[in-house]
Amino acid sequence: MKPIFKIPLKYGLIGSLFGIILIIVLFYSNRHPLLIPPMFDFRIILFGLFIFFGLKEFREYYNGGILNFWQGMVISFIMYMMIGVVVGVFIIAFANLVPEFLEGYITGTIKGMELEKSRLLTEGSITISEEEFNRQVTLLKETSPMLLAVDYIIKSCFIGFFLAIIISVILRRTEKRF
């Protein structure tokens, strides 16, 4: 297998294991992992570390000290997608095995919406009606484990994409032409 696929698969699987462990630890320490604000999301550090070390290994040990931007983006894409999908599948299984996981997410999200209710209904540049607010709460109560997993994967793509750009630019090293 070519290193451009072998390295992200290796780091993706290891990163998936870390992601799963973090979800379990956070959940059982009464801190629901899917209710953490985006700026404190553990995926930022997780993806950052694994993308950095994966690209560095590819550049130094398999590509003669050279890393093109496109190589960094491809390797990073495979890594963060693998982590997102594997952890997403785990979320489906975990939410089905431990119903409190899904219930905790729904309850926590509804509490957050209730705390922001007055701002959502009257304040701010964008407001919603009481009817729309109640409709959103009703829809939230119908959330499924599959929806949690899809949400996790989509958010992982956004986080991973922006980190991939930054880290690929930082680690990029092209051949000397002179």
Image: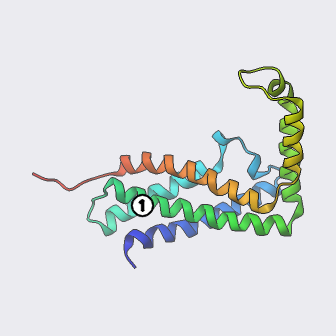
Residue 15 visible in the snapshot: no
> Would you name the residue on which mark 1 appears?
74
SS category of the residue bearing label 1: helix
Residue 89, by quadrant, is bottom right
Q: Is residue 91 left or right of residue 17?
A: right
- Position of the N terminus, as image quadrant, is bottom left
Q: Is residue 177 left or right of residue 170?
A: left
Query: Residue 74 or 54: which is nearer the viewer?
Result: 74
| Residue sitting at x 83%, y 37% | 112
Q: Is residue 52 left or right of residue 99?
A: left
Q: Position of residue 93 (x, y in %)?
A: 77, 69
Kind of residue sitting beneath label 1:
Val
Q: Coloured how? A: rainbow
Q: Position of residue 66 (x, y in %)?
A: 27, 59
Q: How many marks?
A: 1
Residue 8 visible in the snapshot: yes
Give neighbour class at mark 1: few <14, some 14-19, many 20+ (Cα, 10 Å): some
Q: Position of residue 65 (x, y in %)?
A: 27, 60
Query: Residue 58 or 133: which is nearer the viewer?
Result: 133
Q: Residue furthest bottom?
A: 1
| Residue sitting at x 66%, y 46% | 41
Q: Is residue 173 left or right of residue 90?
A: left
Residue 174, by quadrant, is bottom left
Q: Position of residue 88 (x, y in %)?
A: 68, 63
| Residue sitting at x 57%, y 68% | 14
